[in-house]
Amino acid sequence: MTALPRGETPGSPAADDDAVVAPPSADVPAPSAGDGTETEGGAPGSAGAGDTEPAPGTGGPAEATDGGTDDAADGEPAGAADGTTDDGPDGADDSDVPDDSADGTTDDEPAEPAEAAEDTADGAGAGADAAPAQLSEAEAELAAQRELRERIEKRKAEKAGPITAGGKLSGKAADLLAAVRAVESGEQSATSFFDSPAPAAPRRPAPEPAPARPRAPEPARAPQSASPQAVAATAAVLAEGGAPAALAGPAAEALGAQAADALRVDPWQLLAVPGVRPEQADGFARALLGAECGPDDERRTAALVGWLLERAALRGHTALDASEVRAALAERSVTDPDAAVQHAVAEGVVLVFQNDGQDGQDHDGQGAGASAESGEEPGADTEQAGQEPVQVLLGLDRYALAEESLADGLARLVNACEKDADWTEAASAASSPSAAELIRAVAAHGLVAHTGGEAARAEPAALITAARALGLRALGATHSADGRRRLAAATGDPEAAVTLAGLLSGEQGPGRDEEGAVAVDLLVVLDAPQLDVETAAILVESLADGTRLVLSGDPGVLGSAGAGRVFADVLAARACPQIVSRTPDPGPIGELVSGIGIGELNQVEAPGKEVVIVPVRDAGEAVHRTVQLVADSVPRAIGVPSSDTQVITVGHGGSAGTRALNAALKQRLNPGPGRFGGFDPGDRVVHVPAPGRAEPGVVVSADAEGLHLDCAGTKVVVAQERVESSVRHGWALSAHQAAGMRWPAVVVVLPGDAAQGLSRSWVYTAFSRGERHLSVVHGVDQALPRAVAQPPAQDRTTRLRTLLETPAR
């Protein structure tokens, strides 16, 4: 097992600061690529040595550099190939997020009808030849048909076994086989299937959950790899263009089995490979095409438009203003950006929308064609007529379809719900007025939004308990395993809490009904700000008509790792009742965080050393004091062991980012040679099974199967080839990785080079992760209160709010 590159972010195909495309030729440009002196004191709340001062505040959003920024899509590919600043949501990187591959299963095809048809042709001829000469033509045909039937029956008898042919089929394949057999047997005529309307295809029911038993270690799912032949052919084309062979596998996975032919015809399709940048694709194209290659080549401009929107999705956008795309194309030497955008729309690379409530796009996704054919963008006539111009947005079809599906699904839940349910008694027995208000709202509506801090999570828990007492199938879904544990404790019923990923995969929860819908009457989604648009669309599609859905979360925390701002758009559109909790977070940490939420950085009384500020001069001192706090001061003064203390910092890179901090903390807390791919037994790690999901764990061992982890009691095995891309040390996390989780003690590190990465949402998220204690290693001076005071900005462009506000057409 090979050692990890320097501090690689989980999910990335390579380290941020390593080249993705090496410079084998001049045509393919390659990307570019302290420990302080120990001070006296350092115990939280200790007097002397200037260790403590009033609690700090935060500020507005800002894009940060790799040295100090937080990757929003923590667990996604970590950084740009050229080492540029991260561009993800609130600092996420610009690598592509791989889609979940298919599960690899295939439906069995009904073989017998095909064989019967084959026999029909052969048997008819044989029967005709064998017919006696004295028989008429009609009699000969009848004899041939009898012989054919006998042959078919004989072949069926020969194939008879314990499993009837076609018995393994289900869903549409089984229906087709039954229809063929009905026609063959004469029970129905073939025309009946054309004269009657086709019934709606039923959802395939999920398998029943297996009985509880000790679970074997779960292997981490690796993406499907391309065939060796496709990889070899792709490598040959890459070699012709001077690109490294290491890109052959990712290119074949991204472009499919015909990747070699696709790259030869259109070299700029190399931009579909995660981490490849336009200048690298340009060099590859020049090597293959020679003089035919130019900056305005339509293949180049179309690929650039798609690449720009993929990068925008990593920053959380589901669409971009057309003017932004044109400006970005101009920066890439495209002489006619307008024509380039129109060509990309005409080719179906992107879709075009009007953001005025009438997006110019039919729900079948074909509404953009007229604008592309006419050579004008939607809204041009309005602007020429002197009216206020309409914003024109460009988007990728996957996010456009997800937003429209989600909007339609939410409207379905609103309209299909039983409105006259009487939960008065349950509401009157609620533990708080806010919980009672939430119960009454859910009784009367199919969709409800609930907002509040950490203490307010008791209200959805009370709702779930009350609904289950009424005999309803009620369930709560959280973002993380830690959130699931806390919800189970609040409800007193472990069966009432699941993770959202576990629910959708079928590994957790009650399973699905006969129509394939999740078998619940009420679903409460906690940590709703972490819900991206594609996951939300899948979730809503999985709920049957009449199911009640509650989206609950703290609107002050950082948004989802994936594209979209579902919770914020639902709140902004006022598409459903909104219950605002009146339950404040308790204690000094709760008081500090509540002030940050409204833009105030308050001094708080912390007699029990709940909040401690540790000033530092530089990043080296920040690393040193952080290690001192985790290893000595917090366990001694607060009573929280190092294993329960989490470090949170602004970014992965930089002299006090997660990489530097994890290296220093490993050396102090669990030194070792890293013989298991850079890890040793006892190392704290974070496993990223899919982009946006971070699961803290501990290394147990390693063998030929891979790296064995214990993730909150679940045994996980990560294959050797997946360790580099999906596992990293976890003593220090980014705020995005920490969202949805809490620890007894948290140390937030703010080195001086992290000032640009601070925002009110970032500080709110990081400071609210501690249950009993918060230490702030403070080296950003006045940047912290400025960040808190600046109002949060709308940092993501989406269409969901418009779709929710627009009446159904």
Image: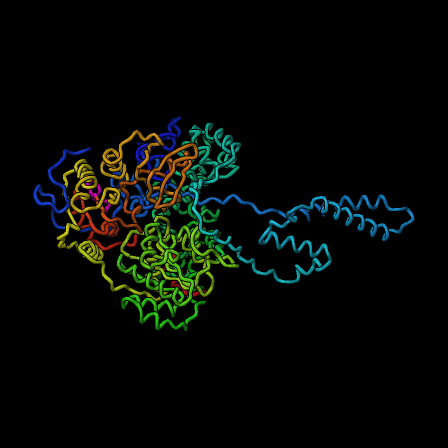
* Left or right: 732 as drawn, with respect to 225: left
Can you say whether 490 is above or below 438 in the image?
Answer: above
Its colouring scheme is rainbow
Q: Position of residue 70 (x, y in %)?
A: 28, 44
Residue located 28% across and 44% down the image: 734
Residue located 44% across and 51% down the image: 212
Can you say whether 740 is above or below 195 in the image?
Answer: above
In the rendered image, the quadrant that contains the N terminus is: top left
Q: Is residue 336 visible?
A: no
Farthest residue to the right: give it.
134
Residue 754 is covered by the magenta coloring: yes
Q: Position of residue 113 (x, y in %)?
A: 68, 49
* Left or right: 585 as drawn, with respect to 74: left
Farthest residue to the left: give it.
48
| Quarter holding residue 285 | top left
**How many numbered circles does the render carry?**
0
Q: Nearer the viewer, residue 356 or 365?
A: 365
Residue located 27% across and 40% down the image: 731
Majority SS type along the magenta span? helix
Q: Is residue 190 visible?
A: yes
Question: Magenta stretch?
Answer: 749-758
Farthest residue to the top: give it.
25
Q: Position of residue 542 (x, y in %)?
A: 46, 57
Q: Nearer the viewer, residue 776 or 712?
A: 712
Q: Position of residue 573 (x, y in %)?
A: 35, 62
| Quarter holding residue 583 | bottom left
| Quarter holding residue 723 | top left
Q: Nearer the viewer, residue 699 or 320?
A: 699
Residue 671 is covered by the magenta coloring: no
